[in-house]
Amino acid sequence: MNTDTTQHPAYIRQAWLVILLGLVYGAALAGVQVGLGPRIEENKRQETYGVIPRLVPGADAKHIEPITLEAVGGKTRRVYRAADSNGELRGWVIPASGLGFADRIDLLIGLDSHAERITGMYVLDQKETPGLGNLIVDERFRDQFVKKSVFEPIDVVKTDPKPGSNQIRAVTGATISSDSVASIINKAVEQLRKPILEQQKAVPITDPEKRGASPAAK
Amino acid sequence: MTIPNSEPPSRQPPATSMPLDQPTAGERFIQGILPENPVYRQLLGMCPTLAVTGAMQPAMTMAAATAFVLISANVIVSLIRGLLRPHLRILVFTLTIATFVTIADRALAAYLYTMSKELGPYVPLIIVNCLIISRCEICASKQSVGTALADGVGMSLGFAVALASIATVRELLGLGTWFGLPVMPTVWRHWGVMILPPGAFLTLGLLLGLVEWTASKRQATTKHQ
């Protein structure tokens, strides 16, 4: 050790401040992460949970349950089971992401309780072109996905979509962003519809008595 | 953080030993706001100036985050200026700035989550705002903590004034609002281009021209007298 310091005294003398600052700043940042990390995670969770009742009609924010599933293709994915205040299943929410025009697009996709129709779509995160591609967060674009069937892929067109079809109209000047959203949804539905249905069968959602009772209660 | 007192007195150069051409704390403060405005006079920090001035809220959040980083970095660099090795100083500046940028980014994500999402990559990009490293180099690494603090505050105010002026024009014309509140008459047809990147360049160019024109006009009148 002694010989080491005598061999490199110049090096230490030059760089000790950088090394020391690196350690101090590193420790400070670790402290910030420990202090703020849980809050940031909570913000993200809150955002997801806050949006789910808007994606699945009737769902109650307090009756949302994250479930880990094995998607088609073998990957594990998280979905949310959304129930109403009586605990009765109202639908499912799939977080999905894919590449947009500029960067990754993160979506939440709402499905009805039988995973047959889309009930809503929300953009959690995107960095598309302001004024063009970022209009995918607009309700006018997002509402087009409501009631679309999951049995055929969603098709993006540039003209008015045919009524009753699975077509949606692209955001003007942002065909790539619109296509990306549609393909993220198509892929997510394809990969997760089956596992969701299996999950639904495996766990009895509500006992039949309660299911029969709830409409009368309203 | 107690800034001026935390410095060992031995390292504080006596006022007389300071080179005569170095501005005082008060001068530094005033210069930062208008005479040496970071955006209008030095043309520094163009990335946030163009990118986040579509509306007042993101612009002012950016100004506040930049102010936090600039003032903190200036104070720290000034505190350790006696220990800096000339060839390692840029490394130390960058290290210091990066640390405070990360703190600002995490704090925004924790306490202003929506705004943090709206600003996206521009908060981490504060690290490459030349305004900050130029203040470390020009002022903080050469002058006392008090002067560096005054310089940081002055330059931050100057930056905030510049962002606010551009954001005001763009938000009023592009969205008809100011700080999100509707102010323009309802007959106003929003100029969508103003909140798009071309609007940023147009506004900056016109305001730069205006500032330059007023400055040269003032110079002409003082010469005339």
Image (cartoon, coloured by chain):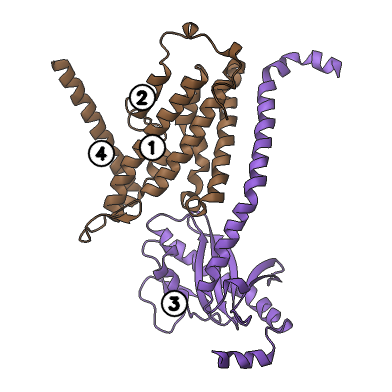
Image coords of residue B126 (percent x, y): 49, 38
Q: Closer to the camera, A116 or A31?
A: A31
Residue for badge 1: B160
Residue for badge 3: A167
Tag nearer the camera, 1 or 4: 1
Residue for badge 2: B30
Is mark 4 in CB contact (under 8 Å) with mark 3?
no
Q: How many marks?
A: 4
Disc 4 element: helix
Q: Closer to the camera, A62 or B187?
A: A62
Q: Closer to the camera, B165 or A154?
A: B165
Residue for badge 4: B206
Disc 3 element: strand
Say above or below: A137 vs A129: below
Which residue shows up at 42% across the image and 54% down it?
A129
Tag nearer the camera, 1 or 3: 1
Residue A190's image quarter? bottom right
Say above or below: A92 vs B174: below
The residue at the far top in this view is B16
